[in-house]
Image (tube, rainbow, N blue to C red):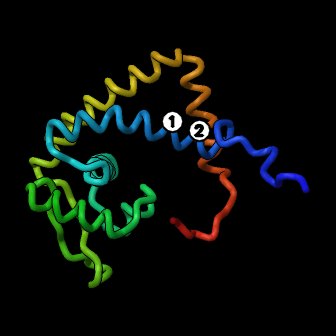
């Protein structure tokens, strides 16, 4: 009987490599926002989405960033408690709240955004300009054309 996984090599499996690269690079920047503000990764991602795209609901953040709603809910509560964001009842959906950065949140986003630009620049320098642009193009292609899933997560 042949081994059904004989052609499978985890170390060359593209989803595994993409995840490993994402984790390695994400942890590199995580020390910046964690050390400065005590943010979790989800708190940073919520702040960054609000800073980049403006006011939106938690559901919008979940859809854009692919973060589960319980994590977003906890991050929103912590950011609100820290004075980084405010909630306003939605005019179109009584069950939803529109989240916005406060002045303090915008200041923190501007600082961390500037540091993120520098971190991104270092990553791109590691690869070189041509390879960095090729990587961006390939990642966008994968994001736009990834095979459909059933929406289940572990």
Would you say 108 lies left or right of 75 here? left
Which residue is situated farthest in the bottom direction here? 94
Q: Secondary structure at mark 2?
A: helix
Q: Which residue is under mark 2?
A: 17
Residue at horizontal 66 percent and vertical 42 percent from the top:
10
Residue at horizontal 28 percent and vertical 77 percent from the top:
96
**Is residue 136 shown above or below 121?**
below
**Is residue 17 shown above or below 129?**
below
Give coordinates of residue 130: x percent, y percent. Answer: 59, 18
Residue 21: assigned label: 1
Which residue is situated farthest in the right direction here? 1
**Is residue 131 shown above or below 98?**
above
**Is residue 1 shown above or below 131?**
below
Give coordinates of residue 86: x percent, y percent. Answer: 14, 63
In depth, the one of 40 and 83 nearer the eye is 40
Would you say 8 lies left or right of 56 here? right
Neighbor class of circle 1 (other Cα within 10 Å; few <14, some 14-19, many 20+) is few
Q: Quadrant of residue 119?
A: top left
Residue at horizontal 66 percent and vertical 53 percent from the top:
146
In depth, the one of 80 and 38 nearer the eye is 38
Would you say 133 lies left or right of 8 here? left
Query: How many numbered tags mark residues here?
Result: 2
Q: Secondary structure at mark 1?
A: helix
Calculate the distance from the C-alpha at mark 1 to the C-alpha at mark 2: 6 Å
């Amino acid at each position: 009987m042949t081994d059904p996984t004989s052609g499978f090599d985890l170390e060359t499996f593209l989803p595994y490599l993409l995840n490993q690269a994402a984790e390695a690079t994400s942890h590199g920047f995580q020390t910046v926002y964690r050390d400065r503000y005590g943010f979790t990764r989800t708190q940073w991602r919520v702040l960054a989405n609000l800073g980049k795209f403006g006011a939106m609901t938690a559901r919008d953040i979940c859809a854009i960033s692919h973060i589960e709603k319980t994590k977003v809910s906890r991050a929103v509560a912590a950011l609100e408690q820290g004075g980084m964001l405010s909630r306003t009842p939605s005019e179109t959906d009584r069950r939803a709240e529109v989240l916005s950065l406060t002045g303090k949140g915008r200041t923190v986003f501007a600082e961390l955004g500037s540091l993120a630009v520098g971190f991104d620049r270092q990553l791109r320098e590691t690869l070189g300009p041509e390879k960095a642009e090729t990587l961006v193009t390939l990642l966008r292609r994968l994001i736009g054309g990834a095979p459909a899933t059933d929406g289940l997560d572990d």
